[in-house]
């Protein structure tokens, strides 16, 4: 029977709760063009990472990764993937493709579990396979009603799934990896921010204090859940990390239903029933089959 790290499970679930609530936050910055917002998001994430590096005295770890050419190339690829994923998600929310964004993050867990099985050689038990089959049926019910925007959903799922796989296998800890990813993206982000500032519309910053604060808050909203996710991805089987990902789009759908009053379609209801049955089966198998690893764990952040 497999055993799972309790702290890693808590970090994974915490990251997904933050990501699931992101549509509420993105309403505050809806007037900011998606590309400009992503640029500011990167630039405001960098100081948050540097504060964590100083606080945790992680400078030696960052310097060690800088000397590892393979790790740097991997982080360059992962930074491009996460930047692309951020843009797609923000653009989807701003253009009222919330359904497509949610579907993308419902496809994502299946993508992550497939990568774990094929690339990392992980294995699932019989009950876990049954849970995956149930979840897959639920996602198929959603996808059948969204064929015109399926490209967007698939692009979001594949970009983040590959990002998570690279972060799991790279020789860099969560904090050092995210700091270097942000540093790699910062020059491009700064150029984009300057381009928008020089345009007739001007920069989104400084036009309104509340909007400026909302844009700046994108830094901690980005850094903290990504650190938690990277921490969990390194300590849990990638297939398990993938299955936990179902919590994010479920929160998004519940926000749409309870906060925004969106209509719950038959396909969405079928998806919910299948996925929650699958989640209960998967969690029950984890509880039945394992106790938490009691090794000391260094908390993230």
Image: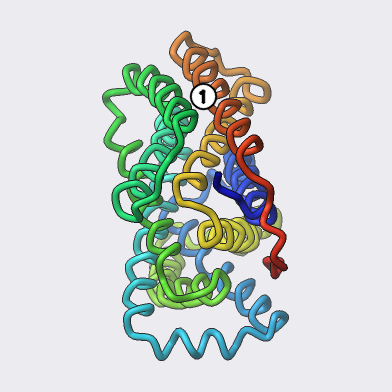
How was the colour assigned to the protein in this rendering? rainbow
Query: Crowding near pointer 1: few (<14 within 10 Å), some, many (20+)?
Result: many
**Kind of element beneath mark 1:** helix
Please name whichever residue, 120 or 25, is drawn nearer the observer in this view of the structure: 120
Q: Is residue 48 left or right of residue 182?
A: right
In percent of width and height, residue 147 lies at: 28, 23
Residue 241, compared with residue 256, is above or below; it is below
Q: Quadrant of residue 141?
A: top left
Residue 250, compared with residue 162, is above or below; it is above
The residue wearing badge 1 is 275
How many numbered marks have been drawn onto this rendered protein structure? 1
Please name whichever residue, 85 or 141, is drawn nearer the observer in this view of the structure: 141
In percent of width and height, residue 138 lies at: 43, 20
In percent of width and height, residue 287 lies at: 66, 37
Q: Residue at x 59, y 45 (%)?
A: 16
Please name whichever residue, 99 or 160, is drawn nearer the observer in this view of the structure: 160
Of the 4 image quadrants, the one containing the N terminus is top right
Q: Residue at x 38, y 49 (%)?
A: 116
Please name whichever residue, 293 or 280, is drawn nearer the observer in this view of the structure: 293
Of the 4 image quadrants, the one containing the C terminus is bottom right
Q: Residue at x 64, y 80 (%)?
A: 53
Residue lying furthest front: 1
Q: Is residue 93 visible?
A: yes
Q: Is residue 25 left or right of residue 198?
A: right
Q: Quadrant of residue 30?
A: top right
Q: Residue at x 58, y 68 (%)?
A: 44
């Amino acid at each position: 029977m497999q055993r799972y790290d309790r702290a890693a499970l808590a970090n994974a679930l915490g990251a997904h709760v933050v990501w699931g609530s992101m549509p509420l936050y993105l309403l505050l910055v809806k007037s900011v063009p998606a590309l400009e917002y992503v640029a500011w998001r990167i630039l405001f994430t960098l100081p948050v990472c540097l504060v964590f590096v100083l606080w945790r005295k992680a400078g030696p770890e960052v310097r060690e990764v800088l000397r590892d050419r393979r790790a740097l190339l991997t982080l360059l690829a992962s930074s491009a993937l996460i930047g692309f994923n951020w843009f797609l998600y923000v653009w989807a929310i701003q253009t009222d493709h919330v359904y497509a964004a949610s579907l993308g993050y419902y496809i994502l867990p299946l993508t992550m579990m497939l990568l774990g099985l094929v690339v990392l050689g992980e294995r699932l038990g019989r009950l876990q396979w049954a849970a995956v089959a149930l979840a897959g049926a639920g996602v198929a019910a959603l996808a059948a009603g969204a064929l015109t925007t399926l490209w967007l959903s698939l692009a979001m799922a594949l970009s983040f799934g590959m990002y998570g796989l690279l972060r799991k296998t790279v020789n860099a800890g969560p904090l050092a990896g995210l700091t270097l990813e942000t540093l790699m993206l910062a020059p491009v982000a700064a150029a984009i921010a300057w381009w928008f500032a020089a345009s007739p519309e001007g920069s989104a910053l400084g036009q309104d204090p509340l909007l400026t604060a909302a844009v700046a808050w994108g830094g901690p909203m980005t850094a903290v859940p990504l650190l938690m996710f990277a921490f969990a991805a390194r300590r849990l089987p990638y297939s398990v990390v993938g299955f936990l990902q179902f919590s994010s789009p479920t929160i998004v759908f519940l926000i749409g239903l309870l906060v925004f009053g969106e209509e719950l379609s038959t396909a969405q209801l079928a998806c919910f029933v299948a996925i929650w049955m699958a989640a209960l089966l998967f969690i029950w198998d984890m509880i039945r089959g394992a106790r938490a690893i009691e090794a000391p764990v260094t908390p993230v952040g």
